[in-house]
């Protein structure tokens, strides 16, 4: 397979991904078939760091299926001044889709289907037997109506607390506080040492923190009820918003240098902050980019108050209506859902496979965090993430973003709750 450099395409040679894949081995022998020929334009926001490494590893695994296929990432080849997602939306609206593109399972997928952007994948699911290999709780998030429309390539967990063991030891703080109240007490201990207690990145990182605090206050049933418009005005949401305010007061929120989640993760990894609430892509950064050892350089736990709950997001690929290279796209989707493909991708990226049939000898090759996460995925109560497209449509998400941006200025929980109630009102009427 040729992995073509078009503009800044994928950034590193395919051989680099092969090295990453070799570290996890093969999940099972699979004879290479002739595969499709020609081109495959995929569209993915995985353009740097561990995410890019994962994509390259998956492309390398794809080589056995389609050795003569030329693949490129349209998100990197575009010269458009718009954000990659906006450029993708423009292309879909213009009837000029890539052959396959990335989306999140759940509400984000449902919107794409409602807009007529995606072709169904029922025949592929039947041929691959995926309905018996993906968790029952995940399957509805891959469907709209009675048909499947995306193939999950990974599972990430959003509700996680990361910490620096050396910082916590000096402060007398614990790595796994069991409640938000306990976390606040531990943050105060860290603050007394002169280190940033809670590292919070820019952009969507604040909403990510907010949703974990709401989940802790409401539990799985209350969290799910929010997305039918219920409960926003209740006392448990009010208490959660007060906790959220108190957490921000013990964070580095005012630091203008915190542009992304990676900046906050680097503070924790470098011993300049005690804690961070972030998804498990932080583990890929701590281990892969910063070279830290799990358990010694960083620790993890379920976000306070959410033990036993797995707040998931799943990156998936789709088949757009009007894809020019349909057979190549279907071959790519088959790779995304295959055992070898999922092991290759997640071994490099730091997420876990969506499939439940991971052989024990292959599971043992994953690192300590991934093995723990695999157990949690199989045994936890699964709920979706707001920030990452699983539970609320785009318009509702945008209204929450506006309410949150206002709150970061006025810091009044009551006013924030009223804005969230108003944001939910259109969904209640629908």
Image (cartoon, rainbow, N blue to C red):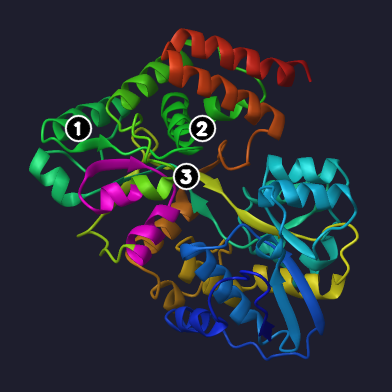
Question: Of 357 and 298, which appears nearest the observer?
Answer: 298
Left/right of residue 308 with respect to residue 88 in the rendered view:
left
Callout 2 environment at 10 Å: few (<14), some (14 to 19), or many (20+)?
some
**Looking at the image, residue 147 lies above or below residue 9:** above
- Determine the image quadrant of residue 296: bottom left
Label 2 element class: helix
- Determine the image quadrant of residue 185: top left
Residue identified by numbered label 1: 186
Residue identified by numbered label 3: 158
Q: Which mark, residue 301? A: none
- Between discs 2 and 3, the one toward the N terminus: 3
Can residue 104 be seen from the camera position used here?
Answer: no
- What is the magenta range? 265-289
Quarter that holds the C terminus: top right
Question: Of 71 and 138, which appears nearest the observer?
Answer: 71
Residue name at image x 70 percent, y 40 percent: 107
**Looking at the image, residue 191 lies above or below residue 347:** above
Label 3 element class: loop
Callout 1 environment at 10 Å: few (<14), some (14 to 19), or many (20+)?
many
Label 1 element class: helix
Label 3 and label 1: CA atoms lie apart by: 21 Å
Residue identified by numbered label 2: 220
- Between discs 3 and 1, the one toward the N terminus: 3
Left/right of residue 252 with respect to residue 370 in the rendered view:
left
- Between discs 2 and 1, the one toward the N terminus: 1
Residue name at image x 35 percent, y 60 percent: 369
């Amino acid at each position: 397979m040729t992995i073509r450099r078009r503009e800044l395409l994928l950034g590193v040679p395919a051989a680099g991904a092969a090295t990453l894949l070799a570290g996890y081995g093969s999940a099972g022998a699979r004879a290479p078939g002739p595969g499709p020929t020609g081109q495959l334009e995929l569209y993915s926001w995985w353009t740097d760091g561990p995410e890019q490494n994962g994509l390259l590893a998956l492309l390398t695994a794809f080589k056995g299926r389609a050795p003569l296929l030329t693949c490129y990432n349209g998100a990197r080849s575009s010269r458009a001044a718009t954000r990659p997602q906006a450029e993708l939306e423009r292309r879909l609206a213009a009837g000029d889709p890539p052959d396959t593109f990335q989306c999140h399972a759940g509400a984000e997928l449902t919107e794409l289907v409602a807009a007529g952007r995606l072709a169904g994948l029922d025949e592929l699911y039947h041929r691959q037997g995926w309905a018996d290999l993906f968790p029952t709780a995940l399957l509805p998030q891959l469907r709209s109506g009675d048909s499947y429309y995306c193939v999950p390539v990974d599972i990430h967990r959003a509700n996680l607390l990361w910490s620096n063991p050396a910082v916590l030891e000096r402060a007398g703080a614990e790595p796994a506080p069991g409640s938000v109240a306990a976390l606040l007490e531990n943050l105060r201990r860290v603050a007394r040492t002169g280190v940033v207690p809670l590292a919070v990145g820019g952009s969507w990182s604040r909403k990510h923190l907010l949703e974990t605090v709401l989940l802790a206050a409401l539990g799985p049933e209350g969290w799910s009820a929010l997305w039918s418009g219920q409960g926003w005005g209740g006392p448990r949401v009010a208490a959660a918003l007060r906790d959220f305010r108190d957490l921000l007061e013990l964070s580095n929120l005012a630091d203008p240098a915190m542009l992304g989640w990676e900046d906050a993760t680097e503070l924790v990894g470098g011993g300049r902050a005690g804690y961070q609430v972030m998804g498990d892509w932080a583990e890929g950064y701590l281990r892969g980019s910063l070279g830290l050892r799990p358990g010694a350089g960083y620790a993890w736990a379920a976000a306070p108050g959410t033990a036993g709950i797995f707040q998931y997001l799943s990156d998936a690929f789709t088949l757009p209506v009007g894809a020019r290279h349909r057979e190549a796209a279907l071959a790519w989707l088959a790779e995304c859902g295959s055992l070898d493909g999922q092991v290759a991708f997640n071994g490099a990226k730091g997420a876990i496979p969506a499939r439940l049939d991971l052989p024990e000898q292959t599971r043992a090759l994953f690192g300590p965090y991934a093995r723990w996460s695999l157990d949690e995925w199989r045994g936890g109560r699964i709920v979706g993430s707001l920030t990452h497209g699983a539970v609320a449509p785009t318009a509702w998400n945008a209204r929450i973003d506006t309410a949150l941006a206002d709150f970061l200025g006025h810091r009044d929980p009551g006013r924030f709750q009223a804005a969230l109630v108003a944001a939910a009102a259109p969904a209640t009427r629908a």
